[in-house]
Image: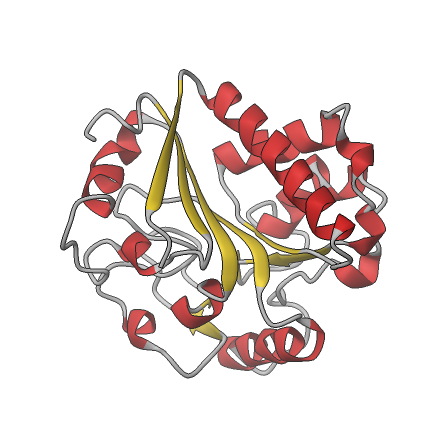
Amino acid sequence: MARAEIRRFGSPEGLAAEVATTLISTLRDAQAEGRVPAVALTGGTVAAKIHEAVAASPDRDEVDWSRVDLWFGDERFVPADDPDRNAGQAAAQLLDNLPLDPERVHTMPASDDGFADLDAAAAAYAGEVREHGGGEFDVVMLGVGPDGHVASLFPGYPQLDVDDEIAVGVTDSPKPPPERISLTFPALNRTRQVWFVVSGEGKADAVGRALAAGTDLHEIPAVGVHGRERTVWYVDEAAASRL
């Protein structure tokens, strides 16, 4: 397991700019090695800033975006056009602004996609990962909630102990909407790098507890995710205030 690195920034904008630059260089280097890189995207305010920074970067053309696989760490199980969808937010900020191959953009199912139920939708996404995934991600980006949750893996929930599935359904989420799909710890951990992207005073306690020794993942799920090569916490000064 890679020891966590901590990168601190004076503002969310500075954090987003650095992550965007690092993502572009990581994808460029992977392609230079002859690989098709895979990234798992996240949602949230700081993710939106990162997506916008990537799309606006003067270096974005260093990457052949038609040869990048994009996945999602979790999704809200709502209709496809619901503004709560991570995929819709990512499309507006990033995906629609890059020359991507649509077949390499792997969105999670929506509630109006015709699946019998939430579990069937989660199983379908797991099947897509098995069929089209390359075995591991290059980067998994994750926000962290004030309660320490990552993706849609919440403290005390049974999904934290699932070790034989790629994706799971989540019901009765403590934050709306109540139904979600999430990659599991085993799936998230099949990655070269994990980047936690966190901003704001409201996240400071969760960041401090996640980076403290001996924290239980059932209390702070963020401690359950780590990269094979690197685990990096990109935090602004407000989120880092209790380190």
Q: Residue 209 location, x and y as percent?
A: 19, 44
Residue 202 vertical placement versus 190 (above, below):
above
Q: Residue 174: which quarter of the image?
A: bottom left
**Colouring mode (rainbow / by chain / secondary structure / one colour):** secondary structure
Find residue 7 and report its horizontal and vertical position in percent: 39, 30
The answer to whether residue 74 is seen in the rendering is no
Q: Nearer the viewer, residue 175 or 128?
A: 128
Quadrant in the picture for the N terminus: bottom left
Q: Residue at x 73, y 25 (%)?
A: 56
The residue furthest left is: 214
Going by the image, does 210 lie left or right of 73?
A: left
In percent of the image, x 28 and y 31: which residue is there?
Answer: 202
Report the quarter where the C terminus lies.
top left
User: Above or below — where is 209 with respect to 200?
Assistant: below
Q: Is residue 211 left or right of residue 75?
A: left
Q: As displayed, is residue 69 above or below residue 97?
A: below
Residue 110 lies, with reference to residue 5, above or below; the image says below
Pick the front one: 139 or 148: 139
Residue visible at 73% across and 43% down in the picture:
28
In the figure, is residue 80 to the left or right of 143?
right
- Residue 173: horizontal and vertical position, in percent? 35, 60
Taking depth in this image into account, of 148 and 137 the one nearest to the observer is 137
The residue most toward the front is 33
Q: Position of residue 14 (x, y in %)?
A: 51, 20
Q: Is residue 218 visible?
A: yes
